[in-house]
Amino acid sequence: MSGGHGAIEGSNKRVALLISVLALFLAFSETLGKAAQTEAIGANIEAANQWAFFQARTIRSTVLKTADEMVALAPPGPNQEAVQAKRAEWAKTMARWDSEPATGEGRKELAEKAKANQEKRDLSLHRYHHYELASAAFQIGIVLASAQVITGIVALAVAGGLLGAAGAVMLGFGFLAPHALHLF
């Protein structure tokens, strides 16, 4: 064997190691991306459920308020004390539907929960987008490094390594600071 052939084998081993490292980081990125996507979907569903409950409370409260206003406009009758007691009961119910800290099911509490879930969803989507870009960089890096093995063009492995580094940076942004870099 000539000295040149051994250099190519050594180079291929380094490229194989680069591909292995890129594949490892690709696996991390894909796993984190799927987890972020799942969390975003879950938070979005939870926010939608809370907003639906909020709307139901609003509709029920509007119906009760309308009934109360209709009774208030009616001329006084023989059951005026019963009517006033019922109107007082309705007022308490409407107040409870507006804010019910004990159960967290008042409109005010539901809106706060829904907004918190929307923020959670948005954070997860930021993370997801960073992980997706990282995955793309790792995948392209693997392809370029693999092409170097076939062609012997060292620049392809270098480009693959640089894309891997860029992917690692995107992975870091997604994990540590998803709001620091706005891409989407």
Image: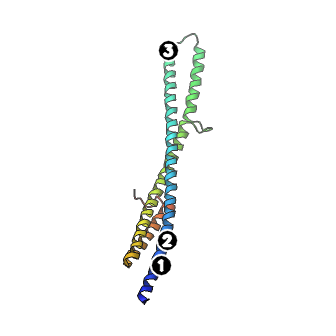
Is 43 placed above or below 106 here?
Answer: below
Pinpoint residue 46: horizontal percent, then vertical percent.
52, 43
Mark 2 or mark 3, which has the lower sequence index? 2
> Please, what secondary structure does the residue beneath circle 1 have?
helix
On residue 129, which mark appears? none
Q: Nearer the viewer, residue 60 or 11?
A: 11
- Which residue is identified by label 3? 74
Amino acid type at mark 2: Ser
Q: Residue at the location (58% across, 32% down)?
A: 96
Q: Residue at x 41, y 76 (%)?
A: 149
Mark 1 and mark 2 residues within 8 Å of each other at the beta carbon: no
Q: Could you tell which of marks 1 and 2 lies nearer the N-terminus?
A: 1
> Outermost residue toward the front?
1
SS label for mark 3: loop
- The kind of residue tagged 1 is Lys
Spatial CA distance of label 1 from label 3 is 91 Å
Quadrant hosting residue 110: top right
Number of numbered discs visible in the structure rendering? 3
Q: Position of residue 23 (x, y in %)?
A: 48, 67
Residue under label 2, please give it: 20
Q: Are marks 1 and 3 in contact (CB under 8 Å)?
A: no
Q: Is residue 144 left or right of residue 120?
A: left
Residue 166 sits in quarter: bottom left
Helix, strand or loop under label 2: helix
Q: Are marks 2 and 3 in contact (CB under 8 Å)?
A: no
Q: Which residue is mark 1?
A: 13
| Figure quadrant of the C terminus | bottom left
Note whether 26 is above or below 157 in the view shown: above
Residue 53 lies, in percent from the top left, at 52, 36
Q: Nearer the viewer, residue 179 or 14?
A: 14
| Distance of label 1 from label 2 (alpha carbons) | 10 Å
